[in-house]
Image (cartoon, grey):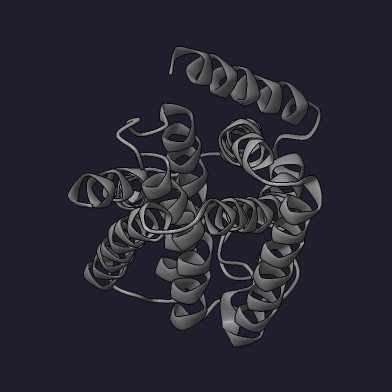
Amino acid sequence: MAEAAFWGFVGASSLIVAAEIAFAFKLSRMVIGLIMAFGVGALIASVSFELVVPALQSVEGWQVALGLATGSLVFFIGDQLIARMGGKNRKSPDGPDDGDGGDDSGLGIVLGTVLDGVPESAVLGMSIVGGAGVSVALLAGFWVSNFPESLGSTVGMRKSGTSKNKIRLMWWGIIAVSAAAAALGFVILDNSSTLTGAFVESFAAGALLTMIADEMAPKAYDRSAVYAGLATVAGFCLAVFLTSLE
């Protein structure tokens, strides 16, 4: 369990790294878009090979489909509720407005980041059940996907007048929650039946795929345009390569 918590911490550590970079530099929209697109490809590959395929090997296809649909629906509902609380543009590198008049509140950003990060961290914890070791592909995909979220949220909060120390405290708190979620994911899967474990894996896959489609992919294309596809495939290729090494 301690190992799972450690890897959950590592996977979420890009939140504070990106925040410090946002304090020190201003990255272009193109760079942010390419990072997001790369993360999209890495996560799609990781979700496919590390979650869906193992689940299909354990239970019937309709059970995996049910888990995917449930995870997607739960994430969608949670994301809509958080958007109403002020977290709609939490991943925007352009600040609170992002061209659509939205307004990000600190609470919305916190809840939204937790909603994105808890499934990821839980999955990392699940990946080491049985002594197999952490999935490097998943770890890399999650680290990259957290980076632009923190970068955009930090820029938005700074523009709204939030202090650097308060922002740092928020990210460190979310990293701690992510570590706890990874430990919980390990405990749940380690003590569950094959059916329950497969459902948890497919549930997490559905939530992550919905997050990719709703949040990451559109913003990646908006910022990097014609290069988004190349960056996405590059991320996918890296995740496939890392998976092949495990």
Say which quadrant the C terminus sits in.
Answer: top left
Q: Nearer the viewer, residue 107 or 212?
A: 212
Q: Residue furthest front?
A: 193
Relative to 168, does residue 7 appear above or below in the rendering? Answer: above
Q: Quadrant of residue 46?
A: top right
Classify residue 179 as left or right of residue 185: left
Relative to 119, does residue 70 appear above or below in the rendering? Answer: below
Q: Position of residue 226 (x, y in %)?
A: 81, 28
Q: Position of residue 22 (x, y in %)?
A: 38, 50
Q: Residue furthest bottom?
A: 85
Residue at image coords 38%, 43%: 25
Residue at image coords 64%, 52%: 202
Q: How many marks?
A: 0
Classify residue 166 as left or right of residue 28: left
Residue at image coords 63%, 58%: 203
Residue at image coords 49%, 72%: 109
Q: Position of residue 88 (x, y in %)?
A: 64, 72
Q: Position of residue 194 (x, y in %)?
A: 54, 50
